[in-house]
Image (cartoon, grey):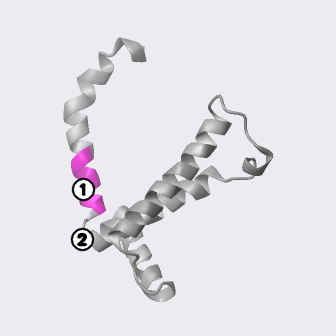
């Protein structure tokens, strides 16, 4: 699935199953909440914090998908073609960062 199709699927889901998009501020708060859930899993599963029993069944993929869903909602409701924006950003990063990362002694 490409990003454009994902945006369309989310828009169709909202129109079919949701009443409407939450406003942008509410979605921004939701995005922050979902990123926090991803951070909790990463910190406890891959970082130095110990994982609580209640966290062991948390699905990282599901939480990342929650983040993606809200990002797609925000893109839809603000008129951003995320596929075009992503491709543009990747091109910028490729031109800007290619030599920088290859020459970074910390990454060797």
Asked if 32 appears above or below 102 in the picture, the reply is: below
Q: Nearer the viewer, residue 8 or 63?
A: 63
Asked if 27 appears above or below 64 in the picture, the reply is: below
Q: Main secondary structure of the magenta part?
A: helix
Using a 10 Å C-alpha cutoff, classify the residue at mark 1 as few (fewer than 14 neighbours), some (14 to 19) or many (20 or more): few
In the rendered image, residue 85, in percent from the top left (x then y), is placed at 24, 56
Can you say which quadrant of the picture contains the N terminus?
Answer: bottom left
At x 19%, y 34%, the residue is 95
- Sooner in the amino-acid sequence: mark 1 or mark 2: 2
At x 24%, y 71%, the residue is 79
According to the picture, the residue beneath numbered tag 1 turns out to be 85
Q: Is residue 73 magenta?
A: no
Using residue 95 as the reference point, say whether residue 58 is left or right of it: right
- The range drawn in magenta is 82-89
In the rendered image, residue 96, in percent from the top left (x then y), is placed at 20, 32
Q: Is residue 84 magenta?
A: yes
In the rendered image, residue 35, in percent from the top left (x then y), is placed at 49, 51
- Count the marks: 2
Q: Quadrant of residue 12?
A: bottom left
Q: Quadrant of residue 25?
A: bottom left
Asked if 89 appears above or below 100 in the picture, the reply is: below
At x 29%, y 61%, the residue is 82
Distance from label 1 to label 2 (Cα)? 11 Å
Using residue 75 as the reference point, say whether residue 58 is left or right of it: right
Q: Nearer the viewer, residue 2 or 28?
A: 28
According to the picture, the residue beneath numbered tag 2 turns out to be 79
Can you say which quadrant of the picture contains the C terminus?
Answer: top left
Q: Secondary structure at mark 2?
A: loop
Q: Nearer the viewer, residue 60 or 96?
A: 60
């Amino acid at each position: 699935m490409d990003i454009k199709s994902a945006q369309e699927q989310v828009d169709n889901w909202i129109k079919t199953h949701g009443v409407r998009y939450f406003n942008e501020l509410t979605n921004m708060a939701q995005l922050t909440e979902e990123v926090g859930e991803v951070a909790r899993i990463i910190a406890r599963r891959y970082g130095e914090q110990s994982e609580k029993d209640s966290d062991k069944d948390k699905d990282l993929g599901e939480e990342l998908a929650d983040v993606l869903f809200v990002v797609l909602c925000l893109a839809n409701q603000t008129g951003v073609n995320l596929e075009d924006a992503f491709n543009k950003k990747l091109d910028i990063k490729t031109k800007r960062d290619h030599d920088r990362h290859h020459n970074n002694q910390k990454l060797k």
